[in-house]
Image: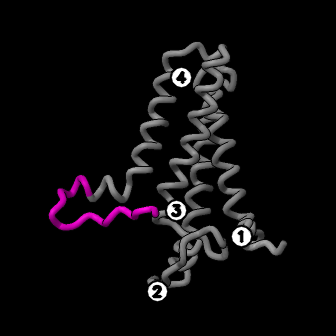
Amino acid sequence: MKTVPSLPTKKHDDHHHVWYYHSLSFVVLAIVLAWIFLYWKSDYTSHRGTFYGNAIADWSGAWIILIVTKFLHERGSTESRPFQDRVKTPWLRFIAEHSLSLFLLLCCVTTGMIFLRMDPNSKWGEVAGNLLSQFVQLLGLVLLTKKLFEKAPSETKR
């Protein structure tokens, strides 16, 4: 029988509470920082260096999704958290309903501007290109999940 860990009580220190609810985010961030350190110390033209550079973008994308999906929403996306309408004006409602895609679009534009100013064949230029690709992919997936979905294996009829 699998036991479920109990929620932290007020007896626990605040740092236990933060760790309990955000441990995955902290560990993934540590992994991103490890990839950055390894890439910084490596020869980017080697197989290892290329791998580290790609891993920075991949793990950064995972970390971004972990963080932003806790706070942001995408209306119509089956993968987004439920929207709680607390805004009063249509403009603010639009921003709230599409905050996830707007944030990812901002990441795409910002990373794209940085990438365009760098030499794409330089050590960090390759990472910037990989990050741009990752943000475009994440934005595309968010937008695709507005109309498309995947059934879990248990939901399919045999």
Mark 3 Cα shell of 10 Å, populated few (<14), some (14-19), many (≥20)? some
- Check disc 2 and give the amino acid type: Lys
- Check disc 1 and give the amino acid type: Ser
Q: Which residue is mark 1?
A: 154
Q: Which residue is mark 3?
A: 69
Q: Position of residue 142 (x, y in %)?
A: 67, 62
Q: Is residue 157 magenta?
A: no
Q: Could you tell me how far apart the alpha carbons at marks 1 and 4 are, in whole angstroms?
A: 41 Å
Q: Could you tell me how far apart the alpha carbons at marks 3 and 1 are, in whole angstroms?
A: 25 Å
Judge depth for marks 3 and 2 and give the one in front.
3
Mark 2 Cα shell of 10 Å, populated few (<14), some (14-19), many (≥20)? few
Q: Could you tell me how far apart the alpha carbons at marks 3 and 2 are, in whole angstroms?
A: 22 Å
Q: Residue at horizontal 66%, vertical 34%?
A: 129
Q: On the image, which quarter does residue 14 sit in?
A: bottom left
Q: Is residue 18 visible?
A: yes
Q: Which residue is mark 2?
A: 88
- Check disc 3 and give the amino acid type: Thr
**Label 4: which secondary element:** helix
- Check disc 4 and give the amino acid type: Tyr
